[in-house]
């Protein structure tokens, strides 16, 4: 049996490298922190954390192995994730166009009020659900967790190591996304963003669309 300390350290390190790589969860937290509010972004972070915890329970409970063996199981997950990302990308593009057309009319509205009004549109009105579904529908999460946590389910590994691995992964994810939500929602960053909001939202929307198409092609 490998020593629990180095095993957990390697799992935490690999997950940290993976979570800081931009993906759908990063884009959701970034967009909400910049265009809505810190509270919206934090709610999305909690949704992402719950989704990650659910995937970890599936992985460590062994149900993920069964899902892989089911005909079309992983393909269905990829289709759902790809279609959802396409939906979010198209909706984000349309929202960016609407924000650009309404920019002149918003000139008499305070920046704080404009941010709140934009936060009430689309998935920004349901940040927790958006974060949760983004995490649950990400088809890369399951195979990644299976490979990452495989050493913890080997014979002879105590159950507390699996619990520590899962808890550490969730904590690291919350810490990273929480840092994004806190840092990107500061006043000077938001003021700079407000001047480039339509362009930035279009770029984020295109990234989601491209990522969704990529998942659908690979499915």
Image (tube, helix red, strand yellow):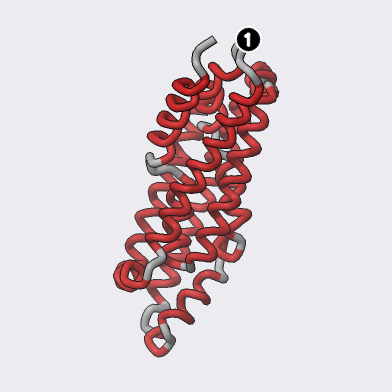
Q: Is residue 93 visible?
A: no
Q: Position of residue 17 (x, y in %)?
A: 38, 34
Q: Nearer the viewer, residue 174 or 216?
A: 174
Q: Is residue 203 above or below residue 116?
A: above
SS at badge 1: loop
Q: Residue furthest bottom?
A: 108
**Residue located 58% across and 45% down the image:** 49
Query: Residue 75: x percent and y percent?
Result: 59, 27
Residue wearing tag 1 = 155
On screen, 185 above or below 139?
Answer: below
How crowded pointer 1 is (Cα within 10 Å; few <14, some 14-19, many 20+) is rated as: few
Question: Which quadrant is home to the N terminus?
Answer: top right
Question: Looking at the image, which residue is at 38% across and 78% down?
Answer: 103
Q: Which one is in front, 14 or 198? A: 14
Vertical position of residue 36 compared to residue 140: above or below: below
Q: Position of residue 205 (x, y in %)?
A: 42, 54
User: Which x, y percent locates residue 48?
Assistant: 56, 47
**Residue 71: which quarter of the image?**
top right
């Amino acid at each position: 049996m490998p020593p629990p300390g180095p095993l957990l350290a390697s799992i935490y390190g690999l997950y940290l490298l993976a979570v800081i790589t931009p993906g759908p969860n990063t884009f959701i937290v970034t967009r909400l922190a910049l265009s809505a509010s810190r509270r919206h972004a934090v709610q999305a972070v909690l949704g992402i954390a719950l989704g990650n915890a659910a995937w970890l329970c599936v992985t460590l409970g062994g149900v993920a192995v069964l899902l892989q063996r089911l005909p079309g199981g992983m393909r269905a997950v990829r289709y759902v994730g790809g279609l959802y990302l396409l939906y979010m990308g198209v909706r984000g593009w349309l929202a960016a166009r609407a924000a650009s057309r309404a920019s002149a009319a918003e000139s008499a509205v305070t920046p704080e009020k404009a941010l709140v009004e934009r936060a009430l549109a689309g998935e920004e009105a349901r940040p927790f659900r958006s974060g949760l579904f983004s995490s649950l529908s990400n088809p890369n999460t399951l195979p990644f967790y299976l490979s990452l946590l495989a050493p913890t389910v080997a014979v002879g590994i105590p159950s507390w190591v699996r619990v520590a691995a899962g808890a550490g992964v969730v904590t690291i994810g919350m810490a990273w996304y929480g840092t994004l939500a806190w840092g990107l929602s500061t006043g000077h960053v938001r003021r700079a963003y407000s001047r480039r909001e339509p362009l930035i939202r279009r770029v984020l929307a295109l990234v989601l669309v491209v990522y969704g198409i990529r998942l659908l092609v690979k499915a």
